Image: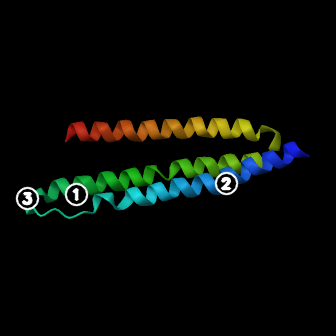
Amino acid sequence: MLADDRNFGIAVFQIVALPVVLLLLAWIVAPSGKSKLLDVAAEAEQRKVDERARWTAKKLLIPPLIYVVSGLLSLLIPSFSMAFMGISTFAVMWVFIFIIALNQQHNRQG
């Protein structure tokens, strides 16, 4: 009985708590490229920053989706809830590494 309660708690945590925190992160990143520059000549650079911020915010919607799917799977198969949590955390870590690597590549190119 206690194991089922723990597995249910893990599933609810994956469905509710983690996606909310990660969605807040995406919401914070989205407007980061909207600051206006005083230099009119730097408008093209500002557009690039806006595009990168929008791209990053869209990619940051992937981790909450991973956790919601993992949480739903944990509700369906409670005995594997810890495994689903570990796999989803590993997947989210790689999504963040992917986002960081591509942003660094964009920064080096221009």
Dot 1 alpha-carbon crowd within 10 angstroms: few under 14, some 14 to 19, many 20 or more? few
Dot 2 alpha-carbon crowd within 10 angstroms: few under 14, some 14 to 19, many 20 or more? many
Circle nearer the N terminus (2, 1): 2
Q: Nearer the viewer, mark 2 or mark 3?
A: 2
- Which secondary structure, mark 3? helix
Quarter of the image for the C terminus: give it.
Answer: top left
Q: Is residue 37 above or below residue 22?
A: below
> Could you tell me how far apart the alpha carbons at marks 1 and 3 are, in whole angstroms?
12 Å
Circle nearer the N terminus (2, 3): 2
| Mark 2, residue position | 15
Residue visible at 64% across and 52% down in the picture: 68
| Mark 1, residue position | 47
Q: Nearer the viewer, mark 2 or mark 1?
A: 2
Please give left or right for residue 71 compared with residue 1 in the image: left
Residue 14: horizontal and vertical position, in percent?
66, 50
Task: Residue type at mark 2: give it.
Answer: Ile
Residue 74: horizontal and vertical position, in percent?
75, 46
Picture mark count: 3
Contact between labelled residues 3 and 2, with CB atoms less than 8 Å apart: no
Contact between labelled residues 1 and 2, with CB atoms less than 8 Å apart: no
> Could you tell me how far apart the alpha carbons at marks 2 and 3 are, in whole angstroms?
46 Å
Residue 46: horizontal and vertical position, in percent?
20, 57
Residue visible at 28% across and 63% down in the picture: 34
Task: Residue type at mark 1: give it.
Answer: Arg
Task: Residue type at mark 3: give it.
Answer: Ala
| Mark 3, residue position | 41
Residue 89: horizontal and vertical position, in percent?
60, 39
Residue visible at 67% across and 54% down in the picture: 15
Circle nearer the N terminus (1, 3): 3
